[in-house]
Amino acid sequence: MGRSGDGLARVTHVGFGDRSARVMPVASGDRPARGVRRLACALLLAPGLAPAHIAYAQRVFGRVTEADGRTGITGVLLTLVQDSTATPAVLSAPDGRFLLRASGAGTWRVKAQAVGRAPQLSRLLVLGAQDTARVELRFPPFVPTLEAVRAAAPGTCRDRPDDDDRAREVWDAIRTAFEASAATERERRTPLELEVTDYRLDVLKQRTSAMKLTLRSWSGAGFLSTAPDELVTRGYVRQVGDSVAYFAPDAAVITSPSFLATHCFRVDERRALFGARELGLAFQPLPSRTVGDVRGTLWLDPRSAALKRLELEYVVPGRTSSLPNADATIDYARLPNGRWFVSRWLLNMPVVREVGPAVGGVSSVAFSGWRSREGVARAISLRDAARLAPSAVIAGRAYDSLAMRPLVATRVRLAGAGEATTDSAGAFTMTVNDPLSVPSPATLTVEAPMLARLGIDSPTREVPVIPGDTTRVEMAIPNARAVRSILCPTLADTGAGASALVGSVPRGDGGTSGVSDSIMVSWYLDSGVKESLRSAVVVGARIGDGAKFVSARVGPDGRFVACGVPVGIKLTVAWPASADHPRGVRGAITIQPGTIGELRLDPAPGPAPPR
Protein backbone atom coordinates (compact mmCIF):
# COMPACT_ATOMS: atom_id res chain seq x y z
CA MET A 1 0.00 0.00 0.00
CA GLY A 2 1.17 3.55 -0.63
CA ARG A 3 2.28 5.87 2.16
CA SER A 4 0.95 9.21 3.24
CA GLY A 5 2.30 12.27 4.96
CA ASP A 6 -0.63 12.43 7.33
CA GLY A 7 1.06 9.91 9.58
CA LEU A 8 -1.81 7.38 9.87
CA ALA A 9 -3.39 4.76 7.68
CA ARG A 10 -6.21 2.32 7.95
CA VAL A 11 -6.38 -0.52 10.49
CA THR A 12 -5.76 -3.81 8.75
CA HIS A 13 -5.86 -6.30 11.61
CA VAL A 14 -6.87 -6.59 15.24
CA GLY A 15 -6.11 -9.99 16.72
CA PHE A 16 -6.64 -11.70 20.06
CA GLY A 17 -4.42 -14.71 19.61
CA ASP A 18 -1.22 -12.78 19.01
CA ARG A 19 -2.38 -9.86 21.20
CA SER A 20 -1.81 -7.30 18.50
CA ALA A 21 -3.62 -4.38 16.97
CA ARG A 22 -1.99 -3.34 13.73
CA VAL A 23 -2.25 -0.10 11.79
CA MET A 24 -0.68 0.61 8.38
CA PRO A 25 2.63 2.52 8.52
CA VAL A 26 3.21 6.22 8.96
CA ALA A 27 5.26 8.18 6.48
CA SER A 28 8.95 8.57 7.14
CA GLY A 29 8.50 12.30 7.70
CA ASP A 30 6.28 11.57 10.70
CA ARG A 31 9.20 10.11 12.69
CA PRO A 32 7.31 7.20 14.26
CA ALA A 33 8.41 6.13 17.69
CA ARG A 34 10.69 3.14 17.89
CA GLY A 35 10.38 0.07 20.08
CA VAL A 36 7.12 -0.33 21.93
CA ARG A 37 5.49 -3.71 22.30
CA ARG A 38 2.15 -4.26 20.53
CA LEU A 39 -0.96 -2.37 21.50
CA ALA A 40 -2.88 -5.20 22.97
CA CYS A 41 0.12 -6.51 24.83
CA ALA A 42 -0.61 -3.50 27.01
CA LEU A 43 -4.28 -4.38 27.09
CA LEU A 44 -4.65 -8.16 27.25
CA LEU A 45 -4.33 -10.55 30.15
CA ALA A 46 -1.28 -12.69 30.84
CA PRO A 47 -2.49 -15.39 33.24
CA GLY A 48 0.60 -17.50 32.53
CA LEU A 49 3.04 -15.03 34.01
CA ALA A 50 4.18 -15.84 37.54
CA PRO A 51 6.10 -13.77 40.04
CA ALA A 52 9.43 -14.83 41.41
CA HIS A 53 9.08 -16.89 44.57
CA ILE A 54 11.43 -16.07 47.41
CA ALA A 55 11.31 -17.66 50.86
CA TYR A 56 12.74 -15.84 53.86
CA ALA A 57 13.62 -17.28 57.26
CA GLN A 58 12.84 -14.19 59.39
CA ARG A 59 9.10 -13.59 59.76
CA VAL A 60 7.04 -10.72 61.16
CA PHE A 61 3.41 -11.31 62.10
CA GLY A 62 1.15 -8.42 62.93
CA ARG A 63 -2.13 -6.57 62.71
CA VAL A 64 -3.04 -3.09 61.59
CA THR A 65 -6.06 -1.43 63.16
CA GLU A 66 -7.91 1.81 63.60
CA ALA A 67 -6.94 4.06 66.50
CA ASP A 68 -9.19 2.03 68.84
CA GLY A 69 -6.87 -0.98 68.51
CA ARG A 70 -9.82 -3.29 67.78
CA THR A 71 -11.11 -2.58 64.27
CA GLY A 72 -8.86 -4.21 61.69
CA ILE A 73 -8.11 -2.38 58.42
CA THR A 74 -8.09 -4.39 55.21
CA GLY A 75 -5.94 -3.66 52.16
CA VAL A 76 -3.18 -1.77 53.98
CA LEU A 77 0.13 -1.90 52.11
CA LEU A 78 2.87 -3.32 54.35
CA THR A 79 6.58 -3.83 53.84
CA LEU A 80 9.76 -4.27 55.86
CA VAL A 81 12.26 -1.44 55.40
CA GLN A 82 15.95 -1.30 56.28
CA ASP A 83 17.89 1.77 55.14
CA SER A 84 17.33 1.74 51.35
CA THR A 85 16.17 -1.89 51.30
CA ALA A 86 12.51 -2.91 51.27
CA THR A 87 10.85 -6.31 50.99
CA PRO A 88 8.02 -6.96 48.51
CA ALA A 89 4.84 -5.36 49.83
CA VAL A 90 1.82 -7.36 50.99
CA LEU A 91 -1.76 -6.33 51.76
CA SER A 92 -3.45 -6.83 55.10
CA ALA A 93 -6.28 -9.35 55.41
CA PRO A 94 -9.89 -8.30 56.13
CA ASP A 95 -9.20 -8.48 59.88
CA GLY A 96 -6.02 -6.42 59.49
CA ARG A 97 -3.58 -9.28 59.98
CA PHE A 98 -0.43 -9.66 57.89
CA LEU A 99 2.74 -11.71 57.48
CA LEU A 100 6.05 -10.29 56.22
CA ARG A 101 9.36 -12.01 55.53
CA ALA A 102 12.70 -10.28 55.88
CA SER A 103 15.39 -10.85 53.26
CA GLY A 104 18.02 -11.38 55.96
CA ALA A 105 18.95 -10.86 59.57
CA GLY A 106 19.29 -7.31 60.83
CA THR A 107 17.30 -4.34 62.07
CA TRP A 108 13.99 -3.69 60.32
CA ARG A 109 10.83 -1.62 60.64
CA VAL A 110 7.35 -2.36 59.35
CA LYS A 111 6.03 0.43 57.10
CA ALA A 112 2.25 0.65 56.67
CA GLN A 113 0.61 2.74 53.92
CA ALA A 114 -3.08 3.25 53.23
CA VAL A 115 -4.69 5.45 50.61
CA GLY A 116 -5.50 8.85 52.10
CA ARG A 117 -3.62 8.25 55.37
CA ALA A 118 -0.19 9.20 56.62
CA PRO A 119 2.30 6.27 56.56
CA GLN A 120 3.00 4.51 59.87
CA LEU A 121 6.30 2.99 61.03
CA SER A 122 6.72 0.30 63.68
CA ARG A 123 9.35 0.14 66.39
CA LEU A 124 12.78 -1.22 65.47
CA LEU A 125 12.80 -4.99 65.06
CA VAL A 126 16.08 -6.86 65.56
CA LEU A 127 15.75 -10.12 63.63
CA GLY A 128 18.29 -12.91 63.82
CA ALA A 129 18.33 -16.13 61.83
CA GLN A 130 14.98 -17.95 62.10
CA ASP A 131 13.58 -15.19 64.35
CA THR A 132 9.88 -14.33 64.51
CA ALA A 133 8.51 -10.97 65.67
CA ARG A 134 5.01 -9.63 66.30
CA VAL A 135 3.89 -6.06 65.64
CA GLU A 136 0.68 -4.05 66.04
CA LEU A 137 0.16 -0.79 64.17
CA ARG A 138 -2.63 1.72 64.70
CA PHE A 139 -3.71 4.35 62.18
CA PRO A 140 -5.04 7.71 63.37
CA PRO A 141 -8.57 8.62 62.21
CA PHE A 142 -8.93 9.30 58.48
CA VAL A 143 -8.81 13.00 57.55
CA PRO A 144 -9.67 13.94 53.91
CA THR A 145 -6.76 16.35 53.42
CA LEU A 146 -6.97 16.34 49.61
CA GLU A 147 -10.21 18.35 49.65
CA ALA A 148 -8.12 21.45 50.39
CA VAL A 149 -5.77 20.93 47.41
CA ARG A 150 -6.37 23.18 44.43
CA ALA A 151 -5.14 23.10 40.84
CA ALA A 152 -1.85 24.73 39.90
CA ALA A 153 -1.70 27.79 37.67
CA PRO A 154 -2.13 27.05 33.95
CA GLY A 155 1.15 26.39 32.21
CA THR A 156 2.87 25.22 35.40
CA CYS A 157 4.66 21.91 34.97
CA ARG A 158 7.20 20.69 37.50
CA ASP A 159 9.96 18.20 36.87
CA ARG A 160 8.80 15.83 39.63
CA PRO A 161 5.36 15.19 41.19
CA ASP A 162 6.77 15.79 44.67
CA ASP A 163 8.34 19.20 43.93
CA ASP A 164 5.59 21.08 45.78
CA ASP A 165 3.24 20.23 48.65
CA ARG A 166 0.07 20.14 46.56
CA ALA A 167 1.45 17.73 43.98
CA ARG A 168 3.18 15.64 46.64
CA GLU A 169 -0.08 14.89 48.46
CA VAL A 170 -1.80 13.85 45.23
CA TRP A 171 1.19 11.81 44.11
CA ASP A 172 1.43 9.96 47.44
CA ALA A 173 -2.20 8.85 47.16
CA ILE A 174 -1.72 7.73 43.54
CA ARG A 175 1.52 5.89 44.27
CA THR A 176 0.00 4.06 47.24
CA ALA A 177 -2.92 2.91 45.08
CA PHE A 178 -0.52 1.76 42.36
CA GLU A 179 1.63 -0.16 44.85
CA ALA A 180 -1.47 -1.82 46.29
CA SER A 181 -2.49 -2.77 42.75
CA ALA A 182 0.94 -4.33 42.18
CA ALA A 183 0.66 -6.24 45.47
CA THR A 184 -2.78 -7.51 44.41
CA GLU A 185 -1.26 -8.78 41.17
CA ARG A 186 1.59 -10.53 42.99
CA GLU A 187 -0.92 -12.31 45.24
CA ARG A 188 -2.78 -13.65 42.22
CA ARG A 189 -5.70 -14.34 44.53
CA THR A 190 -8.24 -11.99 42.95
CA PRO A 191 -10.17 -13.93 40.29
CA LEU A 192 -11.40 -11.74 37.46
CA GLU A 193 -13.60 -12.21 34.45
CA LEU A 194 -12.56 -9.98 31.57
CA GLU A 195 -14.76 -9.16 28.60
CA VAL A 196 -12.80 -7.81 25.63
CA THR A 197 -14.66 -6.14 22.76
CA ASP A 198 -13.44 -4.73 19.45
CA TYR A 199 -15.50 -1.88 18.03
CA ARG A 200 -15.66 0.00 14.76
CA LEU A 201 -16.80 3.61 15.16
CA ASP A 202 -17.56 6.47 12.82
CA VAL A 203 -15.82 9.85 13.00
CA LEU A 204 -18.16 10.90 15.86
CA LYS A 205 -17.25 7.72 17.80
CA GLN A 206 -20.68 6.15 17.27
CA ARG A 207 -20.39 2.36 17.22
CA THR A 208 -21.09 0.63 13.93
CA SER A 209 -20.02 -2.98 14.75
CA ALA A 210 -18.57 -5.07 17.58
CA MET A 211 -16.80 -8.37 18.24
CA LYS A 212 -16.65 -9.73 21.80
CA LEU A 213 -14.42 -12.22 23.65
CA THR A 214 -14.63 -13.26 27.33
CA LEU A 215 -11.50 -14.29 29.24
CA ARG A 216 -10.82 -15.28 32.84
CA SER A 217 -7.72 -14.56 34.89
CA TRP A 218 -6.52 -15.28 38.41
CA SER A 219 -3.54 -12.95 38.25
CA GLY A 220 -5.28 -9.73 39.17
CA ALA A 221 -3.63 -8.10 36.14
CA GLY A 222 -5.77 -6.07 33.78
CA PHE A 223 -3.12 -5.65 31.10
CA LEU A 224 0.53 -6.24 30.35
CA SER A 225 3.43 -3.83 30.38
CA THR A 226 7.08 -3.76 29.39
CA ALA A 227 10.28 -2.40 30.87
CA PRO A 228 10.07 1.36 31.63
CA ASP A 229 13.60 1.96 30.32
CA GLU A 230 12.59 0.50 26.98
CA LEU A 231 9.71 2.94 26.73
CA VAL A 232 12.06 5.84 27.44
CA THR A 233 14.41 4.93 24.61
CA ARG A 234 11.91 3.58 22.08
CA GLY A 235 8.64 5.32 22.90
CA TYR A 236 4.95 4.51 23.37
CA VAL A 237 4.07 4.58 19.66
CA ARG A 238 6.11 2.77 17.07
CA GLN A 239 6.12 1.30 13.62
CA VAL A 240 6.15 -2.51 13.51
CA GLY A 241 6.61 -3.77 9.98
CA ASP A 242 3.72 -2.31 8.00
CA SER A 243 1.75 -1.32 11.10
CA VAL A 244 1.71 1.20 13.95
CA ALA A 245 1.48 -0.10 17.53
CA TYR A 246 0.39 1.78 20.66
CA PHE A 247 1.44 1.01 24.22
CA ALA A 248 -0.37 2.04 27.42
CA PRO A 249 1.67 2.58 30.61
CA ASP A 250 0.73 0.58 33.70
CA ALA A 251 1.31 1.33 37.40
CA ALA A 252 4.89 0.05 37.35
CA VAL A 253 5.76 2.29 34.40
CA ILE A 254 4.16 5.45 35.81
CA THR A 255 5.90 5.09 39.19
CA SER A 256 9.28 4.22 37.65
CA PRO A 257 12.26 6.63 37.79
CA SER A 258 12.38 6.52 33.99
CA PHE A 259 8.84 7.88 33.61
CA LEU A 260 9.35 10.52 36.30
CA ALA A 261 12.57 11.68 34.64
CA THR A 262 10.98 12.16 31.21
CA HIS A 263 7.70 13.88 32.16
CA CYS A 264 6.65 16.99 34.06
CA PHE A 265 3.62 17.24 36.37
CA ARG A 266 0.99 19.65 37.64
CA VAL A 267 -2.12 19.43 39.84
CA ASP A 268 -5.39 19.78 37.94
CA GLU A 269 -9.08 19.65 38.86
CA ARG A 270 -12.46 19.40 37.14
CA ARG A 271 -16.14 18.83 37.71
CA ALA A 272 -17.09 15.32 36.72
CA LEU A 273 -20.50 13.70 36.25
CA PHE A 274 -23.24 15.17 38.48
CA GLY A 275 -20.91 17.99 39.46
CA ALA A 276 -18.60 15.95 41.69
CA ARG A 277 -15.15 17.50 42.01
CA GLU A 278 -12.18 15.43 40.87
CA LEU A 279 -8.54 16.14 41.59
CA GLY A 280 -5.90 15.15 39.09
CA LEU A 281 -2.18 14.89 38.50
CA ALA A 282 -1.54 15.88 34.89
CA PHE A 283 1.67 14.85 33.09
CA GLN A 284 3.25 15.54 29.74
CA PRO A 285 6.53 14.59 28.08
CA LEU A 286 9.46 16.96 28.43
CA PRO A 287 10.23 19.10 25.35
CA SER A 288 13.47 17.14 24.86
CA ARG A 289 11.57 13.94 24.03
CA THR A 290 12.01 12.86 20.40
CA VAL A 291 10.02 9.60 20.34
CA GLY A 292 6.32 8.83 20.60
CA ASP A 293 5.08 9.48 24.13
CA VAL A 294 1.95 9.96 26.25
CA ARG A 295 0.36 12.88 28.05
CA GLY A 296 -2.63 12.66 30.32
CA THR A 297 -4.10 12.93 33.80
CA LEU A 298 -4.50 10.59 36.77
CA TRP A 299 -7.83 11.44 38.42
CA LEU A 300 -8.82 10.69 42.02
CA ASP A 301 -11.62 11.43 44.46
CA PRO A 302 -10.41 14.17 46.84
CA ARG A 303 -12.82 13.02 49.58
CA SER A 304 -11.50 9.45 49.81
CA ALA A 305 -8.15 9.88 47.98
CA ALA A 306 -9.11 6.84 45.89
CA LEU A 307 -7.61 6.59 42.40
CA LYS A 308 -10.34 6.52 39.77
CA ARG A 309 -9.02 6.88 36.23
CA LEU A 310 -6.08 7.46 33.93
CA GLU A 311 -6.85 9.39 30.74
CA LEU A 312 -4.06 9.71 28.19
CA GLU A 313 -3.32 10.74 24.63
CA TYR A 314 -0.54 9.51 22.35
CA VAL A 315 1.70 12.20 20.87
CA VAL A 316 4.42 11.94 18.24
CA PRO A 317 6.92 14.86 18.24
CA GLY A 318 7.25 16.66 14.95
CA ARG A 319 4.08 15.28 13.35
CA THR A 320 2.09 17.94 11.45
CA SER A 321 -0.98 15.86 10.57
CA SER A 322 -4.39 17.33 11.47
CA LEU A 323 -5.80 13.88 12.15
CA PRO A 324 -6.71 13.09 15.78
CA ASN A 325 -4.31 11.29 18.08
CA ALA A 326 -5.01 7.87 19.55
CA ASP A 327 -6.23 8.01 23.12
CA ALA A 328 -6.82 5.59 26.00
CA THR A 329 -8.68 5.40 29.31
CA ILE A 330 -7.91 3.08 32.23
CA ASP A 331 -10.30 2.81 35.20
CA TYR A 332 -9.27 1.52 38.64
CA ALA A 333 -11.47 -0.08 41.32
CA ARG A 334 -11.01 -1.19 44.90
CA LEU A 335 -12.70 -4.32 46.25
CA PRO A 336 -14.18 -4.49 49.77
CA ASN A 337 -11.13 -6.54 50.85
CA GLY A 338 -8.82 -3.67 49.90
CA ARG A 339 -7.47 -5.23 46.70
CA TRP A 340 -7.09 -3.00 43.63
CA PHE A 341 -7.49 -3.95 39.98
CA VAL A 342 -8.02 -2.43 36.54
CA SER A 343 -11.78 -2.53 36.08
CA ARG A 344 -11.91 -1.15 32.54
CA TRP A 345 -9.65 0.03 29.75
CA LEU A 346 -10.39 1.52 26.36
CA LEU A 347 -8.11 2.35 23.44
CA ASN A 348 -9.28 4.42 20.47
CA MET A 349 -7.17 4.29 17.27
CA PRO A 350 -7.85 6.57 14.28
CA VAL A 351 -8.48 4.89 10.93
CA VAL A 352 -7.88 6.43 7.51
CA ARG A 353 -8.97 5.48 4.01
CA GLU A 354 -7.55 6.15 0.58
CA VAL A 355 -9.35 9.02 -1.17
CA GLY A 356 -7.27 9.58 -4.24
CA PRO A 357 -4.64 8.10 -6.52
CA ALA A 358 -1.09 7.72 -5.32
CA VAL A 359 1.22 10.60 -6.21
CA GLY A 360 4.91 9.87 -6.12
CA GLY A 361 4.21 6.54 -4.44
CA VAL A 362 2.21 8.15 -1.60
CA SER A 363 -1.57 7.65 -1.35
CA SER A 364 -4.02 10.43 -0.49
CA VAL A 365 -5.94 9.43 2.65
CA ALA A 366 -8.61 10.89 4.91
CA PHE A 367 -9.80 10.20 8.44
CA SER A 368 -12.68 7.73 8.28
CA GLY A 369 -13.40 6.68 11.85
CA TRP A 370 -12.04 4.79 14.81
CA ARG A 371 -11.07 1.28 15.77
CA SER A 372 -11.52 0.67 19.50
CA ARG A 373 -10.70 -2.11 21.90
CA GLU A 374 -12.35 -2.21 25.32
CA GLY A 375 -11.78 -4.50 28.27
CA VAL A 376 -14.21 -4.69 31.21
CA ALA A 377 -13.22 -6.72 34.27
CA ARG A 378 -15.34 -7.84 37.17
CA ALA A 379 -14.33 -9.72 40.27
CA ILE A 380 -15.67 -13.26 40.61
CA SER A 381 -16.70 -14.60 44.01
CA LEU A 382 -14.40 -17.23 45.47
CA ARG A 383 -17.27 -19.71 45.35
CA ASP A 384 -17.65 -19.22 41.60
CA ALA A 385 -13.91 -19.03 41.05
CA ALA A 386 -13.32 -22.30 42.91
CA ARG A 387 -15.10 -24.12 40.09
CA LEU A 388 -13.02 -22.30 37.49
CA ALA A 389 -9.59 -21.96 39.05
CA PRO A 390 -6.97 -24.34 37.66
CA SER A 391 -4.96 -26.48 40.06
CA ALA A 392 -1.82 -25.21 41.76
CA VAL A 393 1.29 -27.36 41.86
CA ILE A 394 4.06 -27.38 44.48
CA ALA A 395 7.13 -29.25 43.23
CA GLY A 396 10.67 -29.51 44.48
CA ARG A 397 13.43 -31.52 46.07
CA ALA A 398 14.40 -32.31 49.65
CA TYR A 399 17.93 -33.24 50.60
CA ASP A 400 20.08 -33.92 53.64
CA SER A 401 22.84 -31.34 53.81
CA LEU A 402 24.38 -33.22 56.73
CA ALA A 403 25.05 -36.29 54.57
CA MET A 404 24.86 -34.45 51.18
CA ARG A 405 22.30 -36.87 49.77
CA PRO A 406 18.60 -36.78 48.82
CA LEU A 407 15.99 -37.33 51.49
CA VAL A 408 14.29 -40.52 50.32
CA ALA A 409 10.79 -41.66 51.37
CA THR A 410 10.37 -38.52 53.47
CA ARG A 411 6.98 -36.93 54.04
CA VAL A 412 6.47 -33.33 52.86
CA ARG A 413 3.33 -31.55 54.14
CA LEU A 414 1.59 -28.42 52.84
CA ALA A 415 -0.61 -26.92 55.55
CA GLY A 416 -4.27 -27.15 54.65
CA ALA A 417 -3.64 -28.90 51.35
CA GLY A 418 -2.15 -32.38 51.80
CA GLU A 419 1.17 -34.18 51.67
CA ALA A 420 3.56 -36.04 49.37
CA THR A 421 6.46 -38.48 49.77
CA THR A 422 9.87 -37.92 48.20
CA ASP A 423 11.20 -40.40 45.64
CA SER A 424 14.69 -41.88 45.28
CA ALA A 425 16.03 -38.52 44.06
CA GLY A 426 14.41 -36.59 46.89
CA ALA A 427 11.86 -35.05 44.48
CA PHE A 428 8.22 -34.45 45.30
CA THR A 429 5.15 -33.05 43.55
CA MET A 430 1.93 -31.94 45.19
CA THR A 431 -1.20 -30.91 43.27
CA VAL A 432 -3.66 -28.59 45.02
CA ASN A 433 -6.99 -29.07 43.26
CA ASP A 434 -8.80 -26.27 45.12
CA PRO A 435 -6.10 -23.62 45.51
CA LEU A 436 -8.45 -20.79 46.48
CA SER A 437 -9.42 -22.68 49.65
CA VAL A 438 -5.79 -22.79 50.82
CA PRO A 439 -4.23 -19.73 52.49
CA SER A 440 -1.40 -18.31 50.43
CA PRO A 441 1.40 -18.39 51.29
CA ALA A 442 1.07 -21.80 52.95
CA THR A 443 3.60 -23.53 55.18
CA LEU A 444 5.57 -26.38 53.59
CA THR A 445 7.22 -28.76 56.08
CA VAL A 446 9.78 -31.53 55.55
CA GLU A 447 9.36 -34.14 58.29
CA ALA A 448 12.94 -35.40 58.64
CA PRO A 449 13.22 -38.27 61.19
CA MET A 450 16.84 -37.36 61.94
CA LEU A 451 15.88 -33.88 63.08
CA ALA A 452 13.12 -35.32 65.27
CA ARG A 453 15.71 -37.54 66.98
CA LEU A 454 17.89 -34.48 67.55
CA GLY A 455 14.98 -32.58 69.01
CA ILE A 456 15.09 -29.94 66.23
CA ASP A 457 11.97 -28.62 64.56
CA SER A 458 11.49 -29.74 60.97
CA PRO A 459 12.42 -27.13 58.35
CA THR A 460 9.53 -25.08 56.97
CA ARG A 461 9.09 -22.61 54.17
CA GLU A 462 6.25 -20.30 53.20
CA VAL A 463 5.30 -20.95 49.58
CA PRO A 464 2.72 -19.21 47.38
CA VAL A 465 -0.22 -21.34 46.22
CA ILE A 466 -1.17 -19.88 42.84
CA PRO A 467 -3.96 -21.20 40.61
CA GLY A 468 -2.62 -22.41 37.29
CA ASP A 469 1.00 -22.06 38.35
CA THR A 470 3.82 -24.30 39.58
CA THR A 471 5.86 -23.15 42.57
CA ARG A 472 9.28 -24.80 42.74
CA VAL A 473 11.20 -25.03 45.98
CA GLU A 474 14.25 -26.81 47.40
CA MET A 475 14.18 -27.88 51.03
CA ALA A 476 17.28 -28.90 52.94
CA ILE A 477 17.82 -30.04 56.49
CA PRO A 478 20.68 -28.01 57.94
CA ASN A 479 24.33 -29.05 57.77
CA ALA A 480 26.40 -30.05 60.81
CA ARG A 481 27.60 -26.52 61.56
CA ALA A 482 24.03 -25.16 61.41
CA VAL A 483 22.68 -27.99 63.56
CA ARG A 484 25.43 -27.40 66.09
CA SER A 485 24.54 -23.71 66.29
CA ILE A 486 20.89 -24.66 66.88
CA LEU A 487 21.70 -27.25 69.54
CA CYS A 488 24.45 -25.22 71.20
CA PRO A 489 23.72 -21.51 70.54
CA THR A 490 26.14 -20.32 73.25
CA LEU A 491 29.05 -22.40 71.98
CA ALA A 492 31.87 -20.43 70.34
CA ASP A 493 33.01 -21.42 66.87
CA THR A 494 35.36 -24.29 67.72
CA GLY A 495 36.18 -25.16 64.14
CA ALA A 496 36.01 -28.61 62.55
CA GLY A 497 37.47 -30.38 65.60
CA ALA A 498 34.40 -30.05 67.84
CA SER A 499 30.78 -31.05 67.51
CA ALA A 500 27.71 -31.89 69.55
CA LEU A 501 26.49 -35.19 70.94
CA VAL A 502 22.76 -35.84 71.20
CA GLY A 503 21.60 -38.82 73.19
CA SER A 504 18.91 -40.34 75.34
CA VAL A 505 18.81 -42.30 78.59
CA PRO A 506 15.95 -44.72 79.29
CA ARG A 507 13.81 -43.65 82.24
CA GLY A 508 12.12 -46.18 84.49
CA ASP A 509 8.86 -45.90 86.38
CA GLY A 510 10.80 -44.42 89.25
CA GLY A 511 11.25 -41.19 87.32
CA THR A 512 14.09 -38.87 88.24
CA SER A 513 13.73 -38.91 92.01
CA GLY A 514 17.13 -39.28 93.62
CA VAL A 515 18.85 -39.43 90.24
CA SER A 516 21.46 -37.03 88.91
CA ASP A 517 20.14 -34.62 86.30
CA SER A 518 23.53 -34.49 84.56
CA ILE A 519 25.48 -36.88 82.41
CA MET A 520 29.24 -36.79 81.86
CA VAL A 521 31.04 -37.12 78.54
CA SER A 522 34.80 -37.66 78.88
CA TRP A 523 37.74 -38.27 76.57
CA TYR A 524 41.49 -38.64 76.74
CA LEU A 525 43.87 -36.55 74.65
CA ASP A 526 46.97 -38.76 74.54
CA SER A 527 50.06 -38.28 72.43
CA GLY A 528 48.46 -40.12 69.52
CA VAL A 529 45.81 -37.44 69.02
CA LYS A 530 46.55 -35.01 66.22
CA GLU A 531 47.62 -31.56 67.36
CA SER A 532 44.89 -30.01 65.18
CA LEU A 533 42.28 -31.83 67.23
CA ARG A 534 44.00 -31.08 70.51
CA SER A 535 43.93 -27.33 69.81
CA ALA A 536 40.42 -27.37 68.32
CA VAL A 537 38.77 -28.66 71.47
CA VAL A 538 38.54 -25.53 73.59
CA VAL A 539 35.77 -26.51 76.00
CA GLY A 540 35.67 -29.06 78.79
CA ALA A 541 37.22 -29.28 82.24
CA ARG A 542 40.35 -31.26 83.00
CA ILE A 543 39.99 -34.35 85.20
CA GLY A 544 43.56 -35.57 84.91
CA ASP A 545 46.63 -35.60 82.70
CA GLY A 546 45.27 -35.29 79.16
CA ALA A 547 41.73 -36.17 80.20
CA LYS A 548 38.81 -33.78 79.86
CA PHE A 549 35.04 -33.88 80.20
CA VAL A 550 31.84 -31.91 79.69
CA SER A 551 28.57 -32.38 81.48
CA ALA A 552 25.12 -32.20 79.95
CA ARG A 553 21.73 -31.85 81.59
CA VAL A 554 19.29 -34.73 81.13
CA GLY A 555 15.74 -33.59 80.44
CA PRO A 556 12.52 -35.12 81.81
CA ASP A 557 12.22 -37.18 78.63
CA GLY A 558 15.74 -38.60 79.12
CA ARG A 559 17.29 -36.56 76.29
CA PHE A 560 20.60 -34.68 76.56
CA VAL A 561 22.85 -32.51 74.37
CA ALA A 562 26.59 -32.31 75.08
CA CYS A 563 28.22 -29.33 73.40
CA GLY A 564 31.86 -28.94 72.39
CA VAL A 565 32.88 -32.59 72.34
CA PRO A 566 35.75 -33.53 70.00
CA VAL A 567 35.45 -35.45 66.74
CA GLY A 568 37.65 -38.38 65.78
CA ILE A 569 38.26 -39.32 69.46
CA LYS A 570 36.56 -42.04 71.51
CA LEU A 571 34.07 -40.50 73.93
CA THR A 572 32.88 -42.21 77.08
CA VAL A 573 29.41 -41.30 78.33
CA ALA A 574 28.37 -42.16 81.87
CA TRP A 575 25.26 -41.64 84.02
CA PRO A 576 25.28 -42.49 87.74
CA ALA A 577 23.56 -45.53 89.19
CA SER A 578 19.96 -45.13 90.32
CA ALA A 579 17.03 -47.17 91.53
CA ASP A 580 15.95 -47.53 87.92
CA HIS A 581 19.43 -48.55 86.71
CA PRO A 582 21.42 -49.94 89.66
CA ARG A 583 24.56 -50.54 87.61
CA GLY A 584 24.41 -47.08 86.01
CA VAL A 585 24.36 -46.31 82.32
CA ARG A 586 27.43 -46.12 80.13
CA GLY A 587 28.23 -45.91 76.45
CA ALA A 588 30.91 -44.95 73.94
CA ILE A 589 30.98 -43.24 70.56
CA THR A 590 33.43 -41.70 68.09
CA ILE A 591 31.94 -38.78 66.17
CA GLN A 592 33.14 -38.44 62.60
CA PRO A 593 34.22 -35.00 61.34
CA GLY A 594 31.39 -32.98 59.80
CA THR A 595 28.63 -34.86 61.62
CA ILE A 596 26.55 -34.66 64.79
CA GLY A 597 26.84 -37.56 67.22
CA GLU A 598 23.78 -39.62 68.16
CA LEU A 599 23.86 -42.14 71.00
CA ARG A 600 21.21 -44.09 72.87
CA LEU A 601 22.46 -45.35 76.20
CA ASP A 602 21.33 -48.77 77.43
CA PRO A 603 21.61 -49.69 81.13
CA ALA A 604 24.05 -52.38 82.15
CA PRO A 605 22.21 -55.62 83.11
CA GLY A 606 22.34 -57.23 86.54
CA PRO A 607 22.09 -56.13 90.13
CA ALA A 608 23.89 -53.19 91.61
CA PRO A 609 27.58 -53.78 92.35
CA PRO A 610 28.48 -54.41 96.03
CA ARG A 611 29.43 -51.35 98.03
Image (cartoon, rainbow, N blue to C red):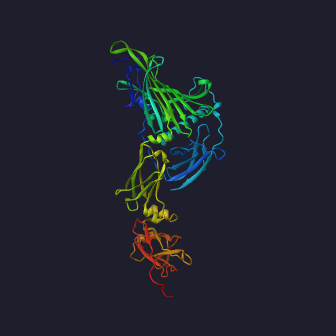
Q: Position of residue 486 (x, y in %)?
A: 49, 62
Q: On the rendered image, what quadrant is the N terminus found in?
A: top left
Q: Position of residue 470 (x, y in %)?
A: 41, 46
Q: Is residue 273 at least partly visible in the picture?
A: yes
Q: Is residue 289 at least partly visible in the picture?
A: no
Between 222 and 324, the one nearer to me in the picture: 222
Q: Quadrant of residue 15?
A: top left
Residue 453 to residue 253: above or below: below
Left or right for 123, reference 213 = right
Q: Position of residue 565 (x, y in %)?
A: 46, 70
Left or right for 155, reference 460 = right
Residue situated furthest bottom in the rendering:
610
* Residue beneath the point at 42% across and 16% down: 368
Residue 403 to residue 155: above or below: below
Between 281 and 504, the one nearer to me in the picture: 504
How many numbered tags mark residues here? 0
Q: Position of residue 312 (x, y in %)?
A: 50, 26
Q: Quadrant of residue 595?
A: bottom left
Q: Quadrant of residue 159?
A: top right
